[in-house]
Amino acid sequence: MPREGKFFDLFDQHAERIASGSKALVDLMGQYGDVGARQKHIDAIDAIEKAADRYTHETVALLHKTFITPFDRESIHQLITQMDDILDLIQDVAESAMLYDLQRVTNEAQQLADLNQMCCERVKAAVNLLSSMENADQILKICAEIDRLES
């Protein structure tokens, strides 16, 4: 069985999709009044989420084929599924806005989308640092910043 696999590459690619999805959500909220742009952004979010799902499935499949992993198997599975949850929730927001036929977006909703994007960019930054334990302090600082933004 293979020793390690390309887990960190898959994490990075998924994290990139998270950042792209959060940007598309900000764009959706910012142009929500334009019906044509609205559908374009919702379609973009759907496509991004589907691409991220492929990375999730590839990671889980690789996990089952790899004998020695870069860190605990359960942690790898938990990381990739929680990353996938981020995009699932972004997609849920976009679909719910359409389902409930929202006609406009409040300033507060736009602010939440902006905060979400800031958090997602930091998730991407932290994930990009995972391949080396020398980055542990930086990763913890980014996690604390995400926690602060969420609060």
Image (cartoon, grey):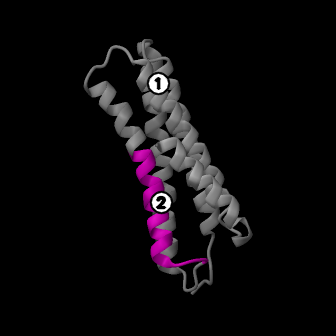
Q: Position of residue 140 (x, y in %)?
A: 62, 60
Disc 2 to disc 1: CB gap under 8 Å: no
Amino acid bearing label 1: Gln
Q: Position of residue 55 (x, y in %)?
A: 52, 58
Q: Is residue 28 magenta?
A: no
Q: In the image, what residue type sits under mark 2?
A: Thr
The mark nearer the N terminus, 2 or 1, is 2
Q: Is residue 3 above or below residue 75?
A: below
Q: Residue 75, how many percent across, how many down?
A: 48, 72
In the image, is residue 47 above or below residue 103?
Answer: below
* Vertical position of residue 3 compared to residue 151: above or below: below
Q: Residues within 10 Å of mark 1 (few under 14, many from 20)?
A: some
Q: Quadrant of the N terminus?
A: bottom right
Magenta residue span: 70-88
> What SS does tag 2 mark?
helix
The residue that disc 1 covers is 110
**Residue 40 appears anywhere in the view:** no
Q: Which label is found at residue 56?
A: 2
In percent of the image, x 46 and y 36: which residue is there? 45
Residue 143 location in percent, x, y? 57, 55
Q: Height in image: 74 above or below 34?
A: below
For image coordinates 44% across by 31% down, the residue present is 43
Helix, strand or loop under label 1: helix
Q: Taken as a whole, is the magenta stretch helix, strand or loop?
A: helix
